[in-house]
Amino acid sequence: MLRVCKGWQSTLQMSRTLLSANLHTSSPAAVLQLKMPSLSPTMAEGTIVKWLKNEGEKVEAGDVVCDIQTDKAVVSMEVDDEGVLAKIIIPADSGSVKVGELIALVAEEGEDWKEVAAAPQSGAAGKSNTVAPTTSGEPVMTGGSVPGISLNMPSLSPTMSEGTIVKWYKAEGDQIGAGDLLCDIQTDKAVVSMEADDEGILAKILVAEGSSGIPVGTAIALTVEEGQDWKDVAIPAAGGIPAPAKQQASAPAPSATPAPTPVSAHHEFVHPAQTGPATALLLSQYNIEPSKISGSGPKGNIVKSDVLNYISANNLTAQVQQVALPQAAGKSQAQETAKPKMIKPRSGYTDTDLTTMRKVIAKRLTDSKQTAPHGYSSATACIDSVSKLRQEYIKSGFKVSINDFVIKAVATALLYVPEMNLNIVKDEPVQMPTIDVSVAVATEAGLITPIIKDAANKAVQQISGEVKELAGRARENKLKLNEFQGGTFTISNLGMFGITEFTAIINSPQAAILAVGGGRMVINPDTMKPETVMTSTLSFDRRYIDEALAADFMTVFRTLMERPELLGAGFLPSVRTDRSAAQIQ
């Protein structure tokens, strides 16, 4: 069973509101609303399997309140604030509940939870609190009479709970086709384009460019079918979401059988000219070859509905379960852009708001440090030979760096010590069949780790080109989802900043990270000649990797850095020392 903090997490929908109109008290009570979260890319509804807290029971940040059956697995839902579970609105085994529906109320600490439990709730559990209900329970609509199709803020990353509309590519009245780009959306990680799934006309833009803090699932635009009067579209009042005349293409029916243990975290991402981001994500998640699907989009392009139909027809299940931590919800600020907001308090000091990315990083690293007992192993290698080889590359027109050799050496070392190439899934180590090296890149919003896929089978100059290209787009927040999610091992290099040695925190769900320092000149005590050395420190999850295995990896890594000619020599068994033979001698 997964916990929410270790499963695909689109959003943990917890909102704070004052229910002054709905409580039989003279003063309003502060209440937290727990809603059915989106826990997988294809999840449209879930079933509450079991409540782990009872009404009247105190809950604290991080407590598991219930288990939810998604279309992939049973996942535990955590709370992010303290309080008392006042009312369970959806009991266990009550059937399917749509994402975003209210499932429970939590009274904030100090409030009378019995008042909250006794208060009548306006609207059924299935009604969104953003909808302004009439006496009949239907959303209040204004304007025309043509029912529109709602385009909602999508979930574009595992930790995304809200987004910012960066740019609209279509104007009201424009005709749209399946696969057309509608707008760019800033997530907590990158700027991602949203595509249309069906043909129609963009009738009304509900959220303007630059609008931030838009929760996942909120209506951002309305479309109508061709032939309908788009100017006469019915517009939701007070933030209400209209009942769509036609549903967007939905995911295949949920299966009660949990997803199989992932066998690989490496999938090719089809070229963006052939598909849009949402389509490519589905192809990646379900490990589908694009050539197997006939495209119905413009110029024969594959669109999302084509993939969904193929998944449904072949009864496929997702092959990869991304393991990432959610963003803390309930107290989220407006979605930050790359530059954080500056606040000048009366004290004269300047406070800087954390970007959403930095909040996510803080939560991930805290969880990693608390969950994984970190072990450490350091090795110092002479890099004179690598430096000479690098000069030969430069003379040949390839501007490679020492870090490019480090990536190649790490990937090659993982070939020799595959026991280190792990992802931790459901608290179990899963050895990954491909070597995908994550490389930490600093951006204004925080660190992000683009991935060099299948790094062991790539030449140094190829790695160099990919690193430059990915790092450039990372700093512009333009990475695609598959370019920074996943990975089997991480490298963090601070040598260029003058740091000679440091330790790093493991990048969950991986089992190890290598912290690389800069080169420094020392005198070799044997030859009494100067040489340049570099110290690297491995942080590893002691639950699954012991000191001896870590030493094997670091020994191989040091050998490869000191003898770079071995990087292209193929697999040589002598490179990894036979530990048992060494002990006998």
Image: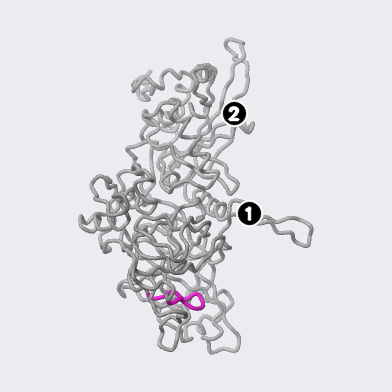
Q: Is residue 541 above or below residue 198?
A: above
Q: In the visual, does 255 lie left or right of 557?
A: left
> Is 546 in the magenta?
no
Picture disc at residue 282: none
Of residues 564 and 218, the one nearer the viewer is 218
Nearer-N-terminus badge (2/1): 1
Q: Amino acid at mark 1?
A: Pro
On the question of residue 49 being in view, the answer is: no
The crowding category of the residue bearing disc 2, from other C-alpha atoms within 10 Å (few below 14, some 14 to 19, many at least 20), is: many
Residue drawn where x is 47% and y is 58% of the image: 160
Magenta segment includes 237 = yes
Q: Where are the magenta residues, as a range?
A: 234-243
Q: Position of residue 99 (x, y in %)?
A: 39, 68
Task: Find residue 371 and report its horizontal and vertical position in percent.
Answer: 47, 50
> Which labelled disc corresponds to residue 518?
2
268 w.r.t. 118: above or below: above
Name the amino acid, label 2: Gly
Q: Nearer the viewer, residue 150 or 171?
A: 171
Label 1 environment density (alpha carbons within 10 Å; few <14, some 14–19, many ≥20): some
* Left or right: 363 as drawn, with respect to 73: right
Secondary element at tag 2:
loop
Query: Do tag 2 and tag 1 residues touch (Cβ < 8 Å)?
Result: no
